[in-house]
Image (tube, rainbow, N blue to C red):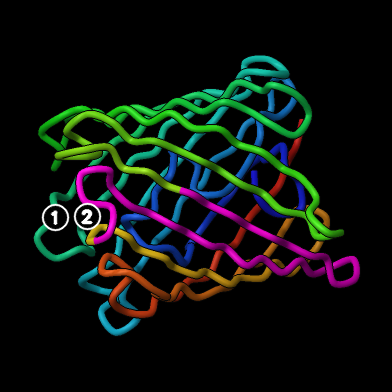
């Protein structure tokens, strides 16, 4: 899980991210944890600061590390705060398989339930590294089938440089680059999501951030805002 502990745990979240930027079932970057590690997120993601009550996804996510290499999880998205969406809007399920301490393969399935009529399949590569002395998380993903992409294939790149400021604060600069192979130029969207973690105690972290559209015809139209309260309880 993203934040102070990459192995993740139990989370209560209200997070700032655009609805279209769901790279996987896990709302945060996180490599598989040790066997038995569990995580639960519950939160709200809004892509429009001026219409939070009408343009927000409410989600619940759970994940479990079956082994030191394999994690499975699911994310249910509710649309009762999103105008025109179904109350039960979508269900993403998936798994991550660790290739080493700092990389993993990820597979996600979009189920044809709720407001989704067709299945979707996403495959991706996750990696944590250091570039020029700066720690960076990254995900490169392709989304296939009609549920995720129609027509073409969605291509998503997520980059997240982060830096610790003392023992109680970590700053993140999330960058999303999204496009579709059917019309790369007109479907290109580049969005930025700066956010910060503030460690409240040994188990609680407060995250706050915004999301902004930077470039491309498909960039986020309006600023988003969110706050995340995370409870960590690693095995």
Residue found farthest to the top: 67
Is 60 in front, or is 84?
84
Stretch in magenta: 157-185
Q: Which mark is residue 163?
A: none
Q: CA distance from mark 2 to mark 1?
A: 5 Å
Is 140 in front, or is 169?
140
8 over 213 or under it: above or below? above
Is 66 in front, or is 203?
66
| Residue appearing at x 85%, y 72% in the figure | 165
56 over 11 or under it: above or below? below
Q: Which residue is mark 1?
A: 85
51 sits to left or right of 108: left
Residue 82 inside the magenta-drawn segment: no
Identify the element where label 2 is drawn: loop
95 over 48 or under it: above or below? above
Is 73 in front, or is 204?
73
Q: Quadrant of residue 114?
A: top left
| Residue appearing at x 50%, y 75% in the figure | 210
Quadrant in which the N terminus appears: top right
Question: Is disc 2 in contact with disc 1, using a CB cutoff of under 8 Å?
Answer: yes
2 sits to left or right of 20: right
Q: Which residue is mark 2?
A: 79
Percent coordinates x, y for residue 41 in the rendering: 51, 47
């Amino acid at each position: 899980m993203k934040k102070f502990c990459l192995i993740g745990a139990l989370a209560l979240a209200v997070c700032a991210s655009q609805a279209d930027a769901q790279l996987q079932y896990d709302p945060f970057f996180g490599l598989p944890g040790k066997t038995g590690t569990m995580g639960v997120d519950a939160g709200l993601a809004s892509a429009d600061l001026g219409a939070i009550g009408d343009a927000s996804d409410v989600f619940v996510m759970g994940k479990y590390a079956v082994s030191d290499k394999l994690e499975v999880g699911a994310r249910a998205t509710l649309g009762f705060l999103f105008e025109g969406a179904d109350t039960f809007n979508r269900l993403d399920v998936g798994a991550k398989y660790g290739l080493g301490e700092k990389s993993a393969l990820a597979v996600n399935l979009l189920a044809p339930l709720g407001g989704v009529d067709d299945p979707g399949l996403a495959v991706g590569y996750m990696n944590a590294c250091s570039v020029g002395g700066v720690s960076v998380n990254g995900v490169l993903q392709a989304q296939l089938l009609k549920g995720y992409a129609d027509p073409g294939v969605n291509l998503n790149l997520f980059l997240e440089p982060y830096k610790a400021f003392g023992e109680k604060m970590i700053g993140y600069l999330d960058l999303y680059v999204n496009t579709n192979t059917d019309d790369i130029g007109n479907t290109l969207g580049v969005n930025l999501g700066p956010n910060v973690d503030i460690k409240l105690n040994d188990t609680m972290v407060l995250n706050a951030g915004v999301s902004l559209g930077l470039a491309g015809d498909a960039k986020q139209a309006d600023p988003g805002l969110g706050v995340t309260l995370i409870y960590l309880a690693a095995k």
